[in-house]
Amino acid sequence: MSLYLSCDSLARAVGAEAVASALASQDLQRTSSRGLYWLEPLLEVDTPQGRIGFGPLTAADVPSVLDALQGEPSSHPLALGLVEELPYLKSQQRLLFARAGITRPLSLDDYRAHGGFEGLTRAVTIGGDETATAVFDSGLRGRGGAAFPAGIKWRTVRATEAAQKYIVCNADEGDSGTFADRMLMEGDPFLLIEGMAIAGITVGASYGYIYVRSEYPQAIATLNEALAIARTNGYLGANVGGSGLAFDMEVRVGAGAYICGEETALLDSLEGKRGIVRAKPPIPALKGLFGLPTLVHNVLTLASVPLILAKGAQFYRDYGMGRSLGTMPFQLAGNIRRGGLVERAFGLTLRELVEDYGGGTASGQPLKAAQVGGPLGAWVPPSQFDTPLDYEAFAGIGAMLGHGGVVVADDTLDMAHMARFAMQFCAEESCGKCTPCRIGSTRGVEVIDRLLAAPDQNVRDEQVIILKDLCDTLQYGSLCALGGMVSFPVASALKYFPADFGLQSSEADQ
């Protein structure tokens, strides 16, 4: 009887290693995580009907679970039934995370048995022009804040003449409430390697870098082991997948600066400099790392490429809506009953995500808002929860999807303090290059403090006008998204939750 237990960082943090020790005498396989985080540590057991689950487990539960497996497993109080039939998982549309919880992260055999390297084989067969066209035709957009069409970047780098080109993976996943990159790097590292290898041989780049935040030690170690395995088996090196083309890569570790999640600051950091945002143009596709053409994508974008090549651009386009095609791994965190990863095609609503999947607040208090898109994302009130999760639909309500992180709050959260935190965060993380971000964020903290301490109506009105003007200056005058988007959480908090600032609705809307 085979047993499966996740080796994911979160599973380990909530006791998976103790459970593994208690199961030391069993045939235990350590797999990636399903992303059903409220059930971790989640133990799965092979049966003729499929894998059944037990969770969340503690080491003390192991003897009773093993006893139940000798008789009627469903009688155990922690029995979950068939894992694939759990509503949270069954209703998802997993493309990127199709192997999550099933395969062992560093098993090349597991990866290939579940479709691994089929995309690379296809890319080698059809050649660079058709591969770049497939990425373009798929409608894949960058899975970061800007959502720029990936195919345009690929064609630009491919068409640019240079003796050396680079692929850079932005794995500096610093947004609050996000963990999809970490999950994928820890649980399915060969998928990212395959995506980068396809990109390299397509655009003519012979070397790549995965820039990982230092707070992800397990992801760093897993990636380094996976790179060595891929290199040994011919998926990296002088003859990638039998293509006759060379591509290799390495992991670089960031030093903890949030600004290095911005692509040009990341490139400066890779070059050994302090991470400071560069003015554009020139764009990195033309003049990036070391002044050479560079294709920069984040983890989820590059990891989407193998499936597009293996299944075809039309297969990918069949998911999603409008210009938001494919699937997105949404990450539920904060005050949420069932936190975890939900991969669905664009188009489901925020209400479905937070209430149907997440089950509402963990506290049981009424929902107040959800911050979508990281610490610079807007606070979306329940009145707008029926907005489809789509890039254009969210832009239409003054919000963004970003990296797909959703942080849920109940009615005890003070939005005025969250607005102040956003300004303070920007002030502390600013690279200092442009005046609106460097000075404006500090002034923003001061204005909010004056607003909250205002002794009368006139002073309060004055501070609201100044704060709104300051948000406009930051949004339209900053060099990058750090300063440009700090207005989103501030303006949304002011608009939808004026009482938290001591305001009447009419004052906030003036």
Image (cartoon, grey):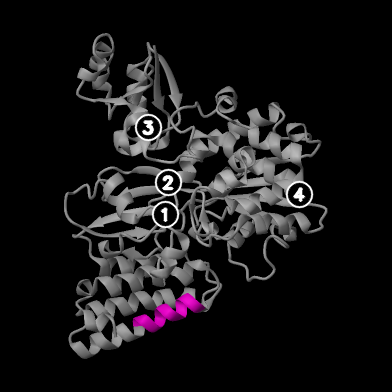
The range drawn in magenta is 467-476
Q: Amino acid at mark 3?
A: Arg
Q: Amino acid at mark 2?
A: Arg
Determine which residue is flagged by label 1: 347
Q: Which residue is found at the position 55% from the left and 28% from the top?
A: 114
Mark 1: which secondary structure? loop
Mark 4: which secondary structure? helix
Give the foreground label among 3 and 4.
4
Mark 2: which secondary structure? strand
Q: Amino acid at mark 4?
A: Asp
User: Residues at badges 3 and 4 in contact (C-beta under 8 Å)?
Assistant: no
Q: Residue 78's image quarter?
A: top left
The single residue placed furthest to the top in the displayed view is: 70
Give how far apart the Cα atoms at labels 3 and 2 are: 26 Å
Give the foreground label among 1 and 3.
1
Give the mark nearer the N terminus: 2 vs 4.
4
Image quadrant in which the N terminus is located: top left
User: Residues at badges 2 and 1 in contact (C-beta under 8 Å)?
Assistant: yes
Give how far apart the Cα atoms at labels 2 and 1 are: 8 Å
Q: Which residue is found at the position 78% from the left and 34% from the top?
A: 239
| Residue 114: assigned label | none
User: Residues at badges 3 and 2 in contact (C-beta under 8 Å)?
Assistant: no
Give the mark nearer the N terminus: 4 vs 1.
4
Question: What main secondary structure does the magenta stretch of the protein show?
Answer: helix
Determine which residue is flagged by label 2: 344
